[in-house]
Amino acid sequence: FQGHSYQGGGLGSMAAVEDGLELRRLEEQTDGLDAENESDDDDGLESSAGPKRSFLSGGAEPSLFRPPVPHATERSRRTCILCSLCFVLPVTVVAVVVAVVIVQRSKSNSQVDEELPPQPSPTPTDSTEPVVSELKFEVLNSLPHDYHAFIQGFLYYAPENVFYSSNGLRRQSNIRKLDASTGEVLQESALEDRYFAEGLTLWNDTLIQLTWTRGAVFMYDRASFKSKGKASYEGEGWGLTTSSDQSELFMSDGTSTIRVLDTSAHLEDAFLYPKRTFTVTKNGVPIRSLNELEYIKGQIWANIWQSDTIVIIDPATGNVRSTLDCRGLLRRQDVPADARPDVLNGIAFDSETGRIWLTGKRWPKIYEIKLLS
């Protein structure tokens, strides 16, 4: 070797020589690899920060790089493969399990759908609740009305062409007969101051008048207004009407309930029990504050207190079949300067001709209307 002298022989010396030769061979191999790396770096592109560095060197300069021993590189490769397998295999297994569960649920749902009977399509309304129509009308005529009368009950008597009305408020309540052509008051009978008059109907030849909170029913001879007795009932009295064949009396009490009164016994001096009741509903919703009633062609027309709407009721079911919007019926030019008109209330019907009249509390007019088809 350069710079060294060789002396002696024997196995020790020979071993040293062999070690030296082996070391030399390793250095030559290393120099050869350095040269190849430098050649590769020269052929590569340079970054903007300077000469490109080998990604295997961890950022070290090529001249300082020494390749790993071959068996160490192989071990690292095997380790990477094992790590990849350890990550990929569990993920694959989970994905397979999820796919199997989804398929099983889909099959189960399809089996349930096949086992269930076909369901009917929903309908907009139930068969027991008819579609509610909105009726239109036109005004044919009007006649004067006492705009101090707080009208509660209203009916027409065709043989004499007259109206009968029940007018409320304490110390002002009365029963009247009006000329149906002029609105003139033809006859009147006042109630005691403690009574607040309400609904009115004609039962055979007897006028029956309710009171609001006293539970008292007054009965009059239709022609003379002479008292024919007194009856009573429970709760409040609001509206009253009778069926066209005089078989039933219908009474409202300010709720959504209509009572059908028992008329099997003499009404005079009797307690009026309801033989049945029914709730008035519109599309399944109870309609409260039912007030003045009128029986027209098999149906009950009812004013709704503090409203311009009239509901038309099927008495067999309580369902509202139609409505009548009366907004604008009372015209501003029809109201005198000293009048204080209140709400719509008052329906009268001529069963012979089909004529209908509407009015209201303290209204200066009674209007004859005609329904439009």
Image (cartoon, rainbow, N blue to C red):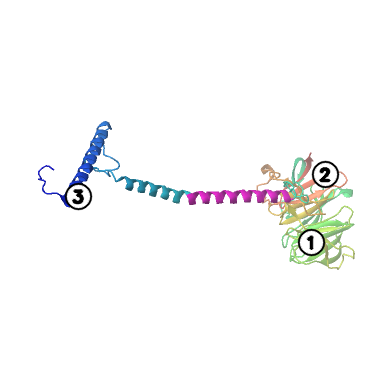
Of labels 3 and 2, earlier in sequence is 3
Can the viewer see residue 308? no
Image coordinates of residue 67 in percent, x first then y, are 28, 43
Distance in Å between CA atoms under marks 3 and 1? 139 Å
Q: Nearer the viewer, mark 3 or mark 1?
A: 3
Give SS at disc 2: loop
Q: From the image, tell me which residue sits under label 2.
A: 355
Rendered image quadrant of residue 30: top left
Residue 267 lies, with reference to residue 352, above or below; the image says below
- Magenta region, main secondary structure: helix
Disc 2, disc 1: CB below 8 Å? no
Residue 137 lies, with reference to residue 90, above or below; the image says above
Looking at the rendered structure, the kind of residue marked 2 is Arg
Q: Which mark is residue 210?
A: 1
Looking at the rendered structure, the kind of residue marked 1 is Leu
Distance in Å between CA atoms under marks 3 and 2? 141 Å
* In magenta segment, residue 90: yes
Label 2 neighbourhood size at 10 Å, few (<14), some (14-19), many (20+)? some
Q: From the image, tell me which residue sits under label 3.
A: 15
Residue 35 lies, with reference to residue 186, above or below; the image says above
Q: Image check: 157 left or right of 97?
A: right
Image coordinates of residue 201 in percent, x first then y, are 83, 56
Looking at the rendering, the stretch of residues picked out in magenta corresponds to 89-116
Of labels 3 and 1, earlier in sequence is 3
Q: Nearer the viewer, mark 3 or mark 2?
A: 3
